[in-house]
Image: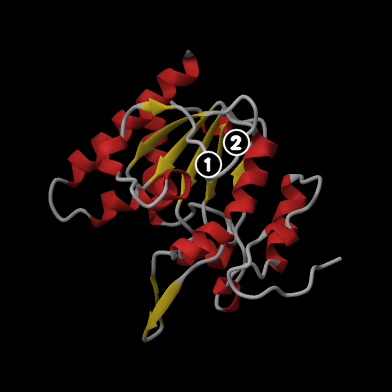
Amino acid sequence: MTPPPSRSGAGAQPWVPDRPTLARLRSAVQECRGCDLYRDATQGVMGEGSTSASLMLLGEQPGDREDREGEPFVGPAGGVLHRALDEAGIDPGDTYTTNVVKHFRFHTVGKRRIHDSPSRQQVAACGPWLAAELALVHPAGVVLLGGTAGKALYGSGFRVGEARGRTEEWPAGVIEPPNPAPWVLATTHPSAVLRARTDRQAVYDALVADLRVARDALRG
Protein backbone atom coordinates (compact mmCIF):
# COMPACT_ATOMS: atom_id res chain seq x y z
CA MET A 1 0.00 0.00 0.00
CA THR A 2 1.29 3.44 -0.90
CA PRO A 3 1.61 5.70 2.16
CA PRO A 4 -0.37 8.93 2.07
CA PRO A 5 1.51 11.98 0.81
CA SER A 6 3.55 13.59 3.56
CA ARG A 7 4.33 17.23 4.00
CA SER A 8 7.47 18.45 2.21
CA GLY A 9 10.62 17.65 4.18
CA ALA A 10 9.07 14.86 6.25
CA GLY A 11 11.49 12.34 4.79
CA ALA A 12 11.37 9.17 2.71
CA GLN A 13 11.14 6.58 5.48
CA PRO A 14 7.38 5.86 5.06
CA TRP A 15 8.02 4.73 1.49
CA VAL A 16 11.01 2.44 2.14
CA PRO A 17 10.02 -1.26 2.01
CA ASP A 18 10.46 -3.28 5.19
CA ARG A 19 12.35 -6.08 3.45
CA PRO A 20 13.95 -4.36 0.49
CA THR A 21 15.30 -5.92 -2.63
CA LEU A 22 16.72 -3.78 -5.40
CA ALA A 23 13.58 -4.35 -7.48
CA ARG A 24 11.36 -3.32 -4.58
CA LEU A 25 13.45 -0.21 -3.90
CA ARG A 26 13.26 0.82 -7.55
CA SER A 27 9.49 0.43 -7.51
CA ALA A 28 8.95 2.10 -4.15
CA VAL A 29 11.05 5.19 -4.93
CA GLN A 30 8.60 6.09 -7.69
CA GLU A 31 5.95 6.70 -5.03
CA CYS A 32 8.19 8.73 -2.71
CA ARG A 33 6.81 12.08 -1.55
CA GLY A 34 9.42 12.65 1.17
CA CYS A 35 10.42 16.00 -0.34
CA ASP A 36 9.24 18.20 -3.19
CA LEU A 37 11.65 17.03 -5.91
CA TYR A 38 9.27 14.34 -7.19
CA ARG A 39 6.98 17.04 -8.58
CA ASP A 40 9.23 18.07 -11.46
CA ALA A 41 11.45 15.01 -11.97
CA THR A 42 10.52 12.38 -14.55
CA GLN A 43 11.13 9.52 -12.12
CA GLY A 44 13.08 8.41 -9.09
CA VAL A 45 16.47 6.87 -9.88
CA MET A 46 17.65 4.10 -7.56
CA GLY A 47 21.12 2.57 -7.66
CA GLU A 48 22.49 0.10 -10.19
CA GLY A 49 24.94 -2.77 -9.92
CA SER A 50 25.60 -5.89 -7.93
CA THR A 51 23.90 -6.13 -4.55
CA SER A 52 26.92 -8.19 -3.42
CA ALA A 53 29.36 -5.50 -4.58
CA SER A 54 32.44 -4.74 -2.49
CA LEU A 55 32.41 -1.06 -3.47
CA MET A 56 29.59 1.49 -3.42
CA LEU A 57 30.08 4.63 -5.52
CA LEU A 58 27.98 7.45 -4.10
CA GLY A 59 27.27 10.59 -6.11
CA GLU A 60 24.99 13.59 -5.69
CA GLN A 61 21.78 13.19 -7.71
CA PRO A 62 20.57 12.04 -11.13
CA GLY A 63 21.31 14.36 -14.02
CA ASP A 64 19.17 15.11 -17.06
CA ARG A 65 19.94 11.81 -18.86
CA GLU A 66 19.67 9.78 -15.68
CA ASP A 67 16.28 11.32 -14.95
CA ARG A 68 15.02 10.42 -18.41
CA GLU A 69 16.52 6.91 -18.56
CA GLY A 70 16.04 5.87 -14.94
CA GLU A 71 19.63 4.69 -14.34
CA PRO A 72 22.48 6.41 -12.46
CA PHE A 73 25.63 7.70 -14.17
CA VAL A 74 24.57 7.11 -17.79
CA GLY A 75 25.37 10.68 -18.88
CA PRO A 76 28.70 12.38 -19.60
CA ALA A 77 29.88 12.25 -15.96
CA GLY A 78 29.11 8.54 -15.96
CA GLY A 79 31.35 8.09 -18.97
CA VAL A 80 34.21 9.77 -17.10
CA LEU A 81 33.57 7.60 -14.03
CA HIS A 82 33.52 4.34 -15.98
CA ARG A 83 36.77 5.23 -17.75
CA ALA A 84 38.41 6.19 -14.45
CA LEU A 85 37.31 2.92 -12.81
CA ASP A 86 38.84 0.98 -15.69
CA GLU A 87 42.14 2.87 -15.41
CA ALA A 88 42.16 2.39 -11.64
CA GLY A 89 41.76 -1.37 -12.03
CA ILE A 90 38.37 -1.63 -10.35
CA ASP A 91 36.05 -4.34 -11.66
CA PRO A 92 32.74 -2.66 -12.61
CA GLY A 93 30.98 -5.94 -11.81
CA ASP A 94 32.03 -5.49 -8.18
CA THR A 95 30.51 -2.01 -7.81
CA TYR A 96 27.14 -0.57 -6.93
CA THR A 97 26.54 2.99 -8.11
CA THR A 98 23.95 5.31 -6.63
CA ASN A 99 23.26 8.89 -5.57
CA VAL A 100 22.46 10.54 -2.27
CA VAL A 101 19.33 12.14 -3.76
CA LYS A 102 17.05 10.07 -5.99
CA HIS A 103 15.27 12.81 -7.97
CA PHE A 104 16.73 15.39 -10.37
CA ARG A 105 16.71 19.00 -9.15
CA PHE A 106 16.94 21.54 -11.96
CA HIS A 107 15.81 24.82 -13.43
CA THR A 108 14.96 25.43 -17.07
CA VAL A 109 16.58 27.78 -19.55
CA GLY A 110 14.52 27.60 -22.71
CA LYS A 111 14.16 23.88 -23.34
CA ARG A 112 17.30 22.96 -21.39
CA ARG A 113 17.14 21.55 -17.88
CA ILE A 114 20.05 22.90 -15.84
CA HIS A 115 21.33 21.06 -12.78
CA ASP A 116 20.75 22.61 -9.35
CA SER A 117 22.41 21.11 -6.28
CA PRO A 118 19.93 19.61 -3.81
CA SER A 119 19.34 21.43 -0.53
CA ARG A 120 20.43 20.07 2.84
CA GLN A 121 16.78 19.31 3.62
CA GLN A 122 16.37 17.32 0.41
CA VAL A 123 19.56 15.36 1.10
CA ALA A 124 18.35 14.57 4.62
CA ALA A 125 14.91 13.54 3.36
CA CYS A 126 16.51 11.00 1.01
CA GLY A 127 18.70 9.49 3.74
CA PRO A 128 16.43 6.46 4.36
CA TRP A 129 16.86 5.35 0.74
CA LEU A 130 20.64 5.35 1.09
CA ALA A 131 20.42 3.53 4.42
CA ALA A 132 18.29 0.84 2.73
CA GLU A 133 20.81 0.48 -0.11
CA LEU A 134 23.69 0.18 2.35
CA ALA A 135 21.85 -2.54 4.25
CA LEU A 136 21.08 -4.37 1.01
CA VAL A 137 24.54 -4.17 -0.58
CA HIS A 138 26.66 -4.20 2.58
CA PRO A 139 29.78 -2.91 0.77
CA ALA A 140 33.29 -3.13 2.17
CA GLY A 141 33.91 0.47 1.12
CA VAL A 142 32.05 3.58 -0.05
CA VAL A 143 33.59 6.15 -2.40
CA LEU A 144 32.06 9.60 -1.95
CA LEU A 145 31.93 11.36 -5.30
CA GLY A 146 31.88 15.06 -4.53
CA GLY A 147 30.83 17.44 -1.81
CA THR A 148 27.12 16.63 -1.58
CA ALA A 149 27.83 12.95 -0.95
CA GLY A 150 30.41 13.91 1.65
CA LYS A 151 28.08 16.30 3.45
CA ALA A 152 25.36 13.65 3.53
CA LEU A 153 27.65 11.55 5.75
CA TYR A 154 29.85 14.09 7.52
CA GLY A 155 27.69 17.19 7.73
CA SER A 156 27.97 20.69 6.33
CA GLY A 157 31.62 21.15 7.32
CA PHE A 158 32.84 18.50 4.89
CA ARG A 159 35.29 19.64 2.19
CA VAL A 160 36.44 17.29 -0.57
CA GLY A 161 39.86 18.91 -0.86
CA GLU A 162 40.60 18.32 2.81
CA ALA A 163 39.39 14.70 2.90
CA ARG A 164 40.11 13.15 -0.48
CA GLY A 165 42.34 10.24 -1.35
CA ARG A 166 42.48 8.36 1.94
CA THR A 167 40.26 5.82 3.64
CA GLU A 168 38.48 6.79 6.83
CA GLU A 169 36.16 5.09 9.29
CA TRP A 170 32.43 5.54 8.81
CA PRO A 171 31.35 8.74 10.58
CA ALA A 172 28.94 8.51 13.49
CA GLY A 173 25.61 10.19 13.80
CA VAL A 174 24.22 10.90 10.31
CA ILE A 175 23.41 7.69 8.39
CA GLU A 176 23.51 4.37 10.19
CA PRO A 177 25.80 1.91 8.36
CA PRO A 178 25.51 -1.88 8.21
CA ASN A 179 27.62 -3.92 10.62
CA PRO A 180 30.54 -4.02 10.12
CA ALA A 181 30.65 -0.47 8.84
CA PRO A 182 32.35 0.14 5.49
CA TRP A 183 35.37 2.38 5.18
CA VAL A 184 34.90 5.67 3.35
CA LEU A 185 37.03 7.42 0.74
CA ALA A 186 36.27 10.86 -0.68
CA THR A 187 37.15 12.13 -4.13
CA THR A 188 35.84 14.66 -6.63
CA HIS A 189 32.69 14.06 -8.61
CA PRO A 190 33.52 13.04 -12.20
CA SER A 191 31.56 16.06 -13.42
CA ALA A 192 34.42 18.17 -12.04
CA VAL A 193 36.56 16.78 -14.85
CA LEU A 194 34.03 17.98 -17.41
CA ARG A 195 33.78 21.42 -15.79
CA ALA A 196 37.53 21.98 -15.59
CA ARG A 197 38.56 24.78 -17.95
CA THR A 198 42.27 24.23 -17.44
CA ASP A 199 44.31 21.21 -16.37
CA ARG A 200 41.43 18.84 -17.14
CA GLN A 201 43.85 15.94 -17.45
CA ALA A 202 45.26 16.69 -14.00
CA VAL A 203 41.76 16.69 -12.48
CA TYR A 204 41.05 13.37 -14.14
CA ASP A 205 44.38 11.86 -13.09
CA ALA A 206 43.68 12.84 -9.48
CA LEU A 207 40.31 11.07 -9.64
CA VAL A 208 41.99 7.92 -10.95
CA ALA A 209 44.65 8.13 -8.22
CA ASP A 210 41.96 8.33 -5.52
CA LEU A 211 40.15 5.35 -7.01
CA ARG A 212 43.39 3.37 -6.93
CA VAL A 213 43.50 3.95 -3.17
CA ALA A 214 40.01 2.40 -3.01
CA ARG A 215 41.18 -0.49 -5.17
CA ASP A 216 44.12 -1.16 -2.84
CA ALA A 217 41.84 -0.98 0.22
CA LEU A 218 39.56 -3.60 -1.32
CA ARG A 219 42.54 -5.86 -1.87
CA GLY A 220 43.43 -5.54 1.78
Q: Nearer the viewer, residue 192 or 134?
A: 134
Instruction: Bin the neighbour count of mark 1 within 10 Å (Cα to Cα): few under 14, some 14-19, many 20 and up.
Output: few
Q: Nearer the viewer, residue 28 or 71?
A: 28
Q: Residues within 10 Å of mark 2 (few under 14, many from 20)?
A: many
Viewer-closest of 173 and 54: 173
Q: Quick check: 8 above or below 139?
A: below
Real-space Cα distance between discs 2 and 1?
Answer: 10 Å
The residue that appears at 87% across and 65% down in the rendered structure is 1
Residue 179: percent from the left, percent from the top? 65, 27
Question: According to the image, label 1 marks what residue?
Answer: 173
Q: Position of residue 41 (x, y in %)?
A: 56, 73
Q: Going 47% across and 35% down the picture, which residue do you hit? A: 171
**Left/right of residue 91 with respect to residue 10 in the rendered view:** left
Question: What is the three-letter code of the residue carrying label 1?
Answer: Gly
Helix, strand or loop at disc 1?
loop
Which residue is found at the position 63% from the left and 45% from the top? 131
User: Residue at position x 62%, y 39% from top?
Assistant: 134
Please say if 42 is above or below 142. Answer: below
Q: Name the secondary structure under disc 2.
A: loop
Between 85 and 129, the one nearer to me in the picture: 129
Which numbered circle lies on residue 177?
2
Identity of the residue furthest to the left in this view: 198
